[in-house]
Image (cartoon, rainbow, N blue to C red):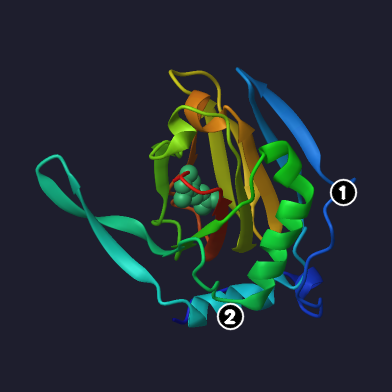
């Protein structure tokens, strides 16, 4: 797939890879037992990974039933279940580094990888928590690495309240933890502004979707 993509100037010559997580991770407590960790620009060479994934992943356009209609899901998807080979070896390093840093606190490793491709500003994900599995009842973590052009990820308390915004792209890491999936919601809103393509890679433990 060819997508108009403006590479970040800083990233053009950077070698693809991740360093061990440590002092650069910043935690923000959101209240109600929810938190987010941020590590901007964690993955270097993110433009290279964007190009590889855009070309190499067997992206799927899905359709879902909404009430009495079947509608296009406004983004491309590919899910790698536990044990399935990931589409790029650097994603094994990414998951390994995430597990080295978070596994003790999480109590289990990140195992699955869900990929979303937002082709332009019309692609989006509506307000939701990742509550299909255990995230609906238990504290857990969802770690997201973003490559390509930044898009805002919004978070708001479930039931209403002001939202917070983090622009994520070019190798940024966000981890949503604690009760975040059941007490807060998140979204990537559509935008009428010019928006370049973004790919997000979400790592989750077994049984969290
Ligand atoms: O693209 C993102 O960063 C968020 C994706 C997401 O929330 C999901 O797939 O559950
Ligand atoms: Fe989500």
Towards the viewer: 180 or 44? 180
Pinpoint residue 81: horizontal percent, then vertical percent.
46, 61
Quarter of the figure with residue 150 = bottom right
User: Residue at point 40% right, 56% down?
Assistant: 123
Pinpoint residue 157: horizontal percent, then vertical percent.
52, 22
Pinpoint residue 90: horizontal percent, then vertical percent.
68, 73
User: Residue at point 14% right, 39% down?
Assistant: 67
Q: Which mark is residue 52?
A: 2
Towards the viewer: 32 or 191? 32
Q: Is residue 174 above or below residue 95?
A: above
Q: Is residue 11 left or right of residue 120?
A: right
Q: Is residue 157 visible?
A: no
Towards the viewer: 209 or 40? 209
Pinpoint residue 190: horizontal percent, then vertical percent.
42, 48
Q: Residues within 10 Å of mark 1 (few under 14, many from 20)?
A: few
Q: Which mark is residue 22?
A: 1
Regarding mark 2 in the picture, which secondary structure is present there?
helix
Quarter of the figure with residue 203 = bottom right
Q: Is residue 184 visible?
A: yes
Q: Residue furthest left?
A: 68
């Amino acid at each position: 797939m060819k997508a108009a993509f403006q590479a970040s100037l800083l990233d053009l010559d950077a070698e693809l890879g991740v360093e061990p997580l440590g002092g650069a991770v910043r935690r923000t407590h959101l209240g109600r037992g929810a938190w987010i960790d941020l590590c901007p620009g964690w993955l270097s060479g993110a433009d290279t990974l964007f190009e590889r994934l855009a070309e190499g992943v067997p992206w799927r356009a899905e359709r879902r039933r909404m009430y009495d209609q079947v509608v296009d899901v406004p983004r491309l998807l590919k899910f790698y279940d536990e044990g399935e080979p990931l589409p790029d070896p650097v994603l094994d390093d990414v998951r390994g580094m995430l597990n080295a840093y978070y596994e003790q606190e999480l109590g289990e490793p990140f195992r699955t990888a869900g990929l979303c491709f937002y082709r332009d500003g019309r692609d989006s994900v509506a307000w939701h928590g990742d509550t299909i599995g255990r995230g609906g009842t238990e504290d857990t973590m969802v770690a997201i690495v973003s490559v390509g052009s930044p898009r805002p990820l919004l978070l708001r308390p479930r039931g209403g309240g002001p939202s917070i915004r983090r622009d994520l792209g070019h190798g940024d890491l966000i981890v949503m933890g604690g009760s975040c999936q059941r007490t807060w919601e998140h979204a990537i809103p559509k935008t009428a502004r010019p928006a370049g393509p973004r790919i997000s890679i979400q790592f989750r433990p077994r049984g969290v979707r």
